[in-house]
Amino acid sequence: MANLRAKQADRTGSSGGGVPDIHRSPRSAAFVMSPALGDTLNLLIVAHNLSLAGWRVDVFGAHAYALADWFPHLRIAPALTPADARGVLTNYPFVIQMHRDRPLAQVGDWHAGFIDLHEVEYAKNFHCMAKRFAVFAAARFDLGDAVVSNGMRPPAGLKFRKHASRVAVHPEASTPDKRWLPERFLELSRRLQASGLQIEFVMEARERSRWENLPGERPLLRSFASSALLAEWLYESGWFIGNDSGIGHLASSLGIPTLTLFRRRGAAQRWRPGFTTGDIVLPSWWVPTAGLKERWWRESITVARVVNAFRGLRSRVIGPASQMGSTEILER
């Protein structure tokens, strides 16, 4: 086992010669977080496991800083600027960043303890990112074991899944190629509302114009001024449905069951939310080639398939007796 871990550690760090020995160096690490929410929440799994093992862990990142009250066991500061990075990070034996060249470039050129997770992200296995990062933490830092958790805890005064019938739907994504068809999200919301569920769409304020001008009725549109306010609302929601996005990872990290729509199986294997119970929906098998799947994936995912997948998720979480609405409403 020790030899296996040593080989795994060699493959997952990219800092080259002179790498500090984790058993001899002070157990202290700085985490430089991506500006992406999903990347941040998954990399915090490594930070959390080091914290559990007694390491001093300092985190630098905008989303992490906004959510600092949800991670009271970690020391969290705003994102570093490139101008300040070297002066701050030289004080740590280890500097950990998800990507080799972002948000800070060339750190490995001047910091012997720089570690990135590029090889972990693109390793050929079936684990989701949350599981990959937990396995990495155990192997690279000789922890013996690791939890698939970033330690996120709610501030006082919030009630978990208080609005059990509320379904948070995120119909947006960071890029257009990840977005299912708007008219199908609207039809999905109508069918779920007809079965007695409360549907609310969540999106950034700059994205609202794409939905406010659509014809017909639409659910309530929610936007939040900060990641912390979004987290409070999600934590008290019952369910999450959405495209591949950071908000899905946030919902999962908060313990909210998720259903996520993906355009490709490989992306789904790596990037499906992995903190709690969740399912995925993929393009239909009848689309014959990778190129056509990429072009027509939205059309191949029908509303009925998403509704039935959500029905299955609810059954897994709270049992068959919870099946909402009639079969006629769900499947028509």
Image (spheres, helix red, strand yellow):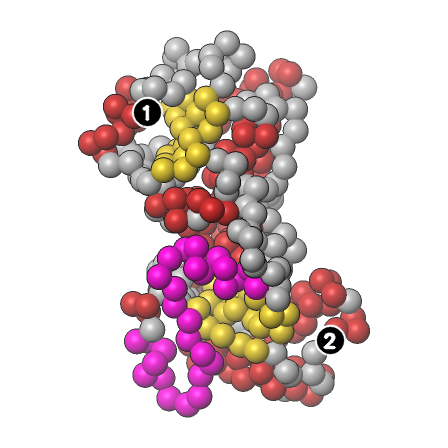
Depth check: 288 or 137 in front?
Answer: 137
- Which of the two marks, 1 or 2, is nearer to us in this view? 1
Amino acid found under the numbered disc labelled 1 = Leu
Q: Residue at x 38, y 21 (%)?
A: 92
Q: Residues within 10 Å of mark 1 (few under 14, many from 20)?
A: many
Query: Left or right: where does residue 313 sit relative to residue 85?
Result: right
Quadrant of the rendered image containing residue 255 = bottom right
Badge 1 element: helix
Q: Earlier in the sequence, mark 1 or mark 2?
A: 1
Residue under label 1, please give it: 89
Asked whether the beta carbons under mark 1 and mark 2 sit within 8 Å of each other, the answer is no
**Residue 128 is covered by the magenta coloring:** no
User: Residue 35, which numbered label?
Assistant: none
Examine the structure image and report whether residue 224 is included in the region drawn in magenta.
yes
Q: What is the distance, in whole Å, between disc 1 and disc 2 at their CAs? A: 52 Å
Q: Residue at x 57, y 17 (%)?
A: 6
Q: Secondary structure at mark 2?
A: loop
Quadrant in the rendering for residue 99: top left
State left or right for residue 327 relative to residue 126: right
Q: Quadrant of the N terminus?
A: top right
Give the labeled residue for mark 2: 323
Q: Is residue 8 above or below residue 225?
A: above
Viewer-proximal residue among 25 and 296: 25
Quarter placement of the C terminus: bottom right
User: Does 258 appear above or below 208?
Assistant: above
**Residue positioned 20% across, 31% down in the render:** 83
Compared across the picture, whether 230 is left or right of 236 comes to: left
Residue drawn 63% across the image and 32% down it: 146
Span shown in magenta: 209-236
Q: Position of residue 153 (x, y in %)?
A: 56, 47
What is the number of callouts on the image? Answer: 2
Is residue 45 at all visible to an observer of this figure?
yes
